[in-house]
C-alpha cells in the first residue's frame, strides 16, 4: 500500500496536477515535506534501524543500536537524556543513515531521515508531559497533601480538587475518576504516568499542578517543590506558545518556545534526580524526552538558519491531532448516511459543510 502512495507522491512531484484557476489552466506540483505519526509508525514506514524499541539496559549498552533515527543517541557513549548544548549525540545529527532497508518512500528525490518527524501530540501529551502529570499527582500524595486514607481515597480527593479547578477555569475534563491504573501506579515502585485516553486531560492536569504546587510553595517552601513548580510552569508556557498560534508564529514567540522548552527539560532532569536521591521512582526518563529535544531543535535550527525571518513554522505542524480530528468529523458524518452509498454521501456532506465555512 505504501509503495502505491509513494508512487503517487512521486507523480505529483514530477508531473503535478492540473487545476483551473480564474479560467486559466495551472499545473501545481506537490512536494511531501514531512511524514508524521506516532513513533512505531515512523519506524515501520521508514524501515528505521534506530528507534525507541532499541533502548537497552545499561548492562547491554555496548550492543545498543541507538534510539533515534536523526542521531546516535542511545548508543554507548551517547546518553539520550542529555539535553545540554554539549551533548555528544548532537555531533552525530544526520551523520549516520538510520535505514536497515530502503523505505517505500526512498523513491522520492528529497527522501532523508528528517522527512520522518516526531509527533508533538504523542511525544508531549501522551509522553513527556503525561509523565510529568502522573508524577506530579503522586508527589502530592508522597508529601501528604492529598488528605488521609489509602491511595484510592487520596486519588479520589485529588480528582475532586481537579474537578473543582476544572469548573473554576471553564475547562473540559474528560476523565471520570483518578485511579491507580490512570496514573500507572499499580504498585508503589512504579514510575507514575498519566495514561488517560484524552491528551487534553494532560494539559488540564498540568495546569492544575501549576496552581497546586504554587500554593504549596508559598505555604511550605522547599527546593523539591520549587523545582517541580518551575518545571510544570515552563511546560505549560511552552504548550501555550505552541497552540496559541497557527501554522506560522512570530520570531519572538519561537524564541520564547525554545527557551521554555530547554528550561523545562533541564528542570525535569533536576526533579528526576531529586526524586531518585529520595529513593522515589518519579519523573521517568524515557526515549520520548530525547524526541522532545529534537522538536525544540526543529525551531532552534530554523532560528539559526533564517536569522532575518520574522515568521517561523510552528512545530505543532507535525502533530497528528489535526489529522485525527479530521478523521473523527468525517467518521461522524458516516453514521448519518445510508450504508449503501456511504463513501459518496459522506464526501457530499463534507463538501457541503466545507462550502458553508469557505
Image (cartoon, rainbow, N blue to C red):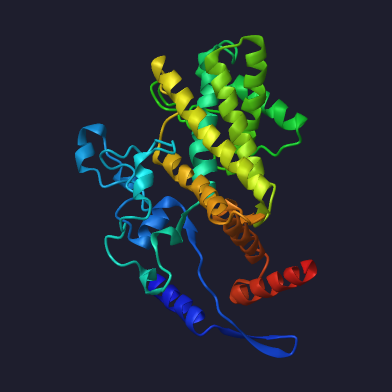
Quarter of the rendering containing residue 340: bottom right
Quarter of the rendering containing residue 320: bottom right
Quadrant for the N terminus, please: bottom left
- Residue 180 position, x and y percent, is 49, 27
Is residue 118 among the parts visible in the rendering?
A: yes
Q: Is residue 215 above or below residue 332?
A: above
Residue projecting furthest to the bottom: 24
Quadrant for the C terminus, please: bottom right
Q: Is residue 152 above or below residue 8?
A: above
Tell whether 357 sits left or right of 290.
right
Quarter of the rendering containing residue 189: top left
Is residue 176 among the parts visible in the rendering?
A: no
Residue placed most toward the observer, 197 or 220: 220
- Residue 294 position, x and y percent, is 46, 47
Q: Is residue 260 above or below residue 322?
A: above
Residue placed most toward the observer, 309 or 156: 309
Residue projecting furthest to the front: 308
Tell whether 263 sits left or right of 81.
right
Q: Residue at x 49, y 58 (%)?
A: 36
Amino acid at each position: 500500500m505504501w509503495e502505491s502512495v509513494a508512487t503517487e507522491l512521486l507523480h505529483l512531484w514530477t508531473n503535478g496536477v492540473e487545476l483551473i484557476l480564474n479560467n486559466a489552466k495551472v499545473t501545481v506540483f506537490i512536494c511531501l515535506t514531512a511524514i508524521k505519526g506516532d513513533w512505531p509508525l515512523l519506524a515501520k514506514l521508514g524501515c528505521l534501524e534506530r528507534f525507541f524499541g532499541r533502548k537497552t539496559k545499561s548492562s547491554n549498552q555496548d550492543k545498543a543500536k541507538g534510539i533515534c533515527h536523526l542521531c546516535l543517541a542511545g548508543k554507548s557513549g551517547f546518553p539520550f537524556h542529555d539535553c545540554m548544548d554539549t551533548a555528544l549525540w548532537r555531533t552525530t545529527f544526520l551523520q549516520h543513515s538510520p535505514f536497515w532497508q530502503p523505505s517505500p518512500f526512498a523513491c522520492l528525490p528529497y527522501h532523508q531521515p528528517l522527512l520522518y518527524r516526531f509527533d508533538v501530540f504523542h511525544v508531549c501529551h501522551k509522553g513527556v508531559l503525561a509523565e510529568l502529570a502522573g508524577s506530579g499527582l503522586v508527589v502530592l500524595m508522597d508529601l501528604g497533601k492529598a488528605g488521609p486514607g489509602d491511595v484510592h481515597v487520596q486519588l479520589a480527593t485529588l480528582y475532586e480538587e481537579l474537578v473543582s479547578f476544572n469548573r473554576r477555569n471553564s475547562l473540559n475534563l474528560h476523565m471520570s475518576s483518578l485511579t491507580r491504573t490512570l496514573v500507572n501506579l499499580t504498585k508503589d515502585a512504579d514510575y507514575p504516568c498519566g495514561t488517560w485516553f484524552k491528551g487534553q486531560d494532560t494539559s488540564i492536569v498540568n495546569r492544575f499542578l501549576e496552581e497546586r504546587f504554587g500554593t504549596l510553595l508559598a505555604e511550605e517552601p522547599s527546593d523539591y517543590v520549587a523545582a517541580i513548580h518551575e518545571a510544570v510552569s515552563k511546560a505549560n508556557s511552552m504548550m501555550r506558545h505552541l497552540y496559541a498560534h497557527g501554522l506560522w508564529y512570530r520570531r519572538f514567540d519561537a524564541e520564547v518556545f525554545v527557551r521554555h522548552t530547554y528550561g523545562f527539560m533541564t528542570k525535569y532532569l533536576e526533579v528526576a534526580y531529586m526524586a531518585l536521591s529520595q529513593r522515589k521512582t518519579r519523573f521517568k526518563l524515557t526515549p520520548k524526552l530525547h524526541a522532545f529535544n529534537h522538536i525544540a531543535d526543529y525551531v532552534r535550527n530554523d532560528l539559526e538558519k533564517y536569522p532575518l525571518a520574522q515568521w517561523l513554522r510552528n512545530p505543532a505542524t507535525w502533530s497528528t491531532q489535526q489529522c485525527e480530528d479530521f478523521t473523527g468529523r468525517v467518521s461522524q458524518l458516516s453514521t448519518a448516511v445510508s450504508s449503501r452509498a456511504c463513501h459518496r454521501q459522506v464526501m457530499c456532506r463534507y463538501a457541503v459543510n466545507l462550502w458553508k465555512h469557505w
